[in-house]
Amino acid sequence: AAEGADLMKATQLKARKKLLRFQRSKIHDWGLVALEPIEAEDFVIEYVGELIRPRISDIRERHYEKMGIGSSYLFRLDDGYVVDATKRGGVARFINHSCEPNCYTKVISVEGQKRIFIYAKRHIAVGEEITYNYKFPLEEKKIPCNCGSKKCRGSLN
Ligand SMILES: Nc1ncnc2c1ncn2[C@@H]1O[C@H](CN(CC[C@H](N)C(=O)O)CC2CN(CCC(c3ccccc3)c3ccccc3)C2)[C@@H](O)[C@H]1O
């Protein structure tokens, strides 16, 4: 019974959302910082937003661009669907890109709903900024990358 409880506790620890804070980032404007140590493969946070169909996301993206909001809080899924965290989203929308990220994203269907979960690739120390690879498609108009990592590709797209 004891080991069962320990296993339960360990699982909860791994699955529990981590203590994070959004604050000024060295990479860009605002970012998300770890307030507690995070172990490799721990669940960090879910990228929460509205799941919208490809056509709707194109319309919204044009609208945001017109409003000068630029690359808004849109997280594109492989099938063209988009999770839009602009109006209603969690703090995960403040996570910046890195060419050597300390996290990775996983899209998991839960009751038919696609959701984006962010996990640690490695141990993350207190105070470290949470990052993942945006995997933006290559584009003409480059967004210069400021991740500062040795293997930086120089741009996000
Ligand atoms: N490694 C990197 N190197 C260089 N640049 C990087 C890197 N990683 C991320 N970025 C930048 O961050 C972007 C991703 N970003 C991640 C978080 C970001 N740091 C932030 O501080 O918001 C979320 C988007 C930034 N936008 C802000 C909209 C906001 C707004 C609009 C106008 C003026 C002020 C603010 C807005 C406000 C209200 C409603 C809707 C939108 C959304 C990338 O597209 C890139 O531009």
Image: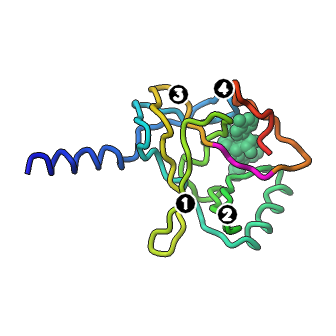
Report, in whole angstroms, how far the alpha carbon at label 1 lies from the one at label 2: 9 Å
Nearer the N terminus, badge 1 or badge 3? 1
Q: Which residues are magenta?
A: 133-137
How crowded pointer 2 is (Cα within 10 Å; few <14, some 14-19, many 20+) is rated as few
- What secondary structure is the magenta-colored segment mainly? loop
Q: Is mark 2 within 8 Å of ligand 1?
A: no
* Residue drawn 73% across the image and 71% down it: 54
- Which kind of residue does numbered mark 1 sit on? Val
| Residue under the image location 83 percent in, 49 percent down | 138
Marks 4 and 3 in Cβ contact (< 8 Å): no
Q: Residues within 10 Å of mark 4 (few under 14, many from 20)?
A: few
Quadrant of the image where one finds ligand 1:
top right
Q: Residues within 10 Å of mark 1 (few under 14, many from 20)?
A: some
Q: Position of residue 129 (x, y in %)?
A: 56, 31
Q: Nearer the viewer, mark 3 or mark 2?
A: 2
Farthest residue in the right direction?
140
The residue most toward the left is 1
The residue tagged 3 is: 128
Q: Which residue is mark 1?
A: 107
Residue 26 numbered tag: 4
Up-down relation of residue 65 to residue 44 (above or below): below
Q: Earlier in the sequence, mark 1 or mark 2?
A: 2
Q: CA distance from mark 4 to mark 1?
A: 27 Å
Q: How is the image coloured?
A: rainbow
For label 2, the residue is 78
